[in-house]
Image: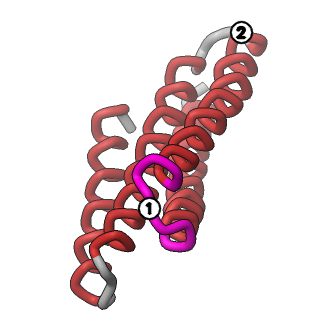
């Protein structure tokens, strides 16, 4: 799957579910904003993670490990900074932000692992 197609699927998944949640859950505007912020942050994290996997594909193992593990550490640092900024600077409610971020992160991680597994299975089969 290309990065563009992956990004589109992630955008549709997060955007569609956020729209559905907005209609189903009677939340105030700050909780909705916190949920959208968490979903957007998880989506950006997922797209960058997939980009790093694509970039490192076919490169030496040390490059792969630097990209994936170093990228993971960097993304976690950026996400932590964004959550702190969301709570302290933007005044977003903590629980909806944390629940949204963790929920979307888990779903998008499962999606990423599925896509990467299929991609590597096809590559091995074609050898």
User: Image check: 95 left or right of 29?
Assistant: right
Quarter of the rendering containing residue 4? top left
Residue 72 point in image, percent of width and height: 67, 33
In this picture, is 25 found above or below 7?
Answer: below
Q: CA distance from mark 1 to mark 2?
A: 42 Å
Near-viewer residue (98 or 61): 98
Q: What residue is shown at x 30% (from left), y 90% (from top)?
A: 26
Q: Quadrant of the C terminus?
A: top right
Q: Which residue is mark 1?
A: 92
Callout 2 crowding tier (Cα within 10 Å): few <14, some 14–19, many ≥20 = few
Magenta stretch encompasses residue 72 = no
Q: Nearer the viewer, residue 65 or 126?
A: 65
Q: Which residues are magenta?
A: 87-96
Q: From the top left corner, tell me how far across and down residue 119 is, in percent.
A: 53, 39
Residue bearing the label numbered 2:
60
Q: Point out the frontmost of discs 1 and 2.
A: 1
Q: Residue at x 42, y 41 (%)?
A: 44
Asked if residue 34 is positioned above or below residue 28 in the image, the reply reads above
Q: Nearer the viewer, residue 28 or 76?
A: 28
SS for tag 1? Answer: loop
Q: Is residue 71 above or below residue 28?
A: above
From the viewer's side, name the closer residue of 18 and 119.
18
Label 1–label 2 contact, CB within 8 A: no
Q: Is residue 118 visible?
A: no
Q: Residue at x 56, y 72 (%)?
A: 95
Please count the marks in the image. 2
Relative horizontal placement of residue 99, taking residue 86 as reference (left or right):
right
Residue drawn at the location 28% of the way across and 89% of the way down: 24
Q: Give the quadrant of the N terminus.
A: top left
**SS for dot 2:** loop
């Amino acid at each position: 799957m290309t990065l563009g197609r992956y990004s589109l699927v992630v955008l549709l998944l997060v955007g569609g579910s956020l729209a559905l949640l907005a209609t189903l859950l009677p939340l105030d505007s700050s909780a909705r904003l916190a949920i959208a912020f968490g979903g957007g942050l998880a989506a950006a994290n997922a797209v960058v993670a997939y980009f790093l996997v694509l970039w490192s594909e076919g490169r030496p193992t040390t490059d792969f490990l630097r990209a994936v593990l170093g990228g993971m550490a960097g993304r976690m640092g950026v996400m932590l900074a964004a959550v702190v900024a969301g709570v302290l600077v933007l005044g977003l409610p903590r629980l909806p932000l944390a629940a949204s971020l963790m929920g979307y992160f888990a779903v998008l991680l499962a999606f990423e692992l599925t896509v990467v597994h299929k991609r590597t299975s096809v590559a091995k089969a074609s050898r």
